[in-house]
Image (cartoon, grey):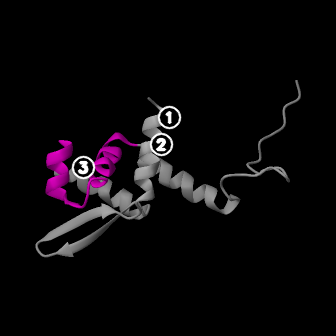
Amino acid sequence: MNRKKNTGHVRAGVKSILRDDEIERHAERLKALANPARLRIVNVLAQGERTVTGICELTGLKQSLVSQQLKILRLNDIVQFRKEVPHTYYSLKEQQVISMLNCLSKCCS
């Protein structure tokens, strides 16, 4: 059987959902979300901004783990923060993440 090698390019005339220049960035974001602890954090932040302490209380995760995971989420532009001494408040950077989680929930139920 002769199989064509998938080069990652869309054939001419076929409408694609993602542009080639977006695929790597989206793959990195999906990798950042593909972790139970990070999904728990994003799920909590979908309800509104929280401090690390608040996230720990709502997720049951340890503070050191939450801090590590928030860093990964920040580096992938999923969460943002603001400082109001003595606290740092985290929130979702883009509300479209909530739509993506809703879609995931519908697709997997």
At x 38%, y 42%, the residue is 35
Q: Which residue is mark 2?
A: 103
**Could you tell me which secondary element the residue under label 2 belongs to?**
helix
Q: CA distance from mark 1 to mark 2?
A: 6 Å
Residue name at image x 29 percent, y 62 percent:
91
Mainly helix, strand or loop, the magenta region?
Answer: helix
Nearest-to-viewer mark from 3 and 2? 2
C-alpha separation, residue under disc 3 versus residue under disc 2: 27 Å
Q: Amino acid at mark 3?
A: Leu
Q: Which residue is mark 3?
A: 65
Query: Was residue 37 drawn as part of the magenta stretch in this picture?
Result: yes
Q: Which residue is mark 1?
A: 107
Question: Quick one: quadrant of the N terminus?
Answer: top right
Task: Please state the extent of the stretch shown in magenta in the rendering.
Answer: 35-62
- Mark toward the viewer: 1 or 3: 1
Specify the amino acid type for callout 2. Answer: Cys
Q: Residue at x 44, y 50 (%)?
A: 99
Q: Earlier in the sequence, mark 3 or mark 2?
A: 3
| Residue 2 sits above or below residue 87 on the image | above
* Residue 44 part of the magenta-drawn span: yes
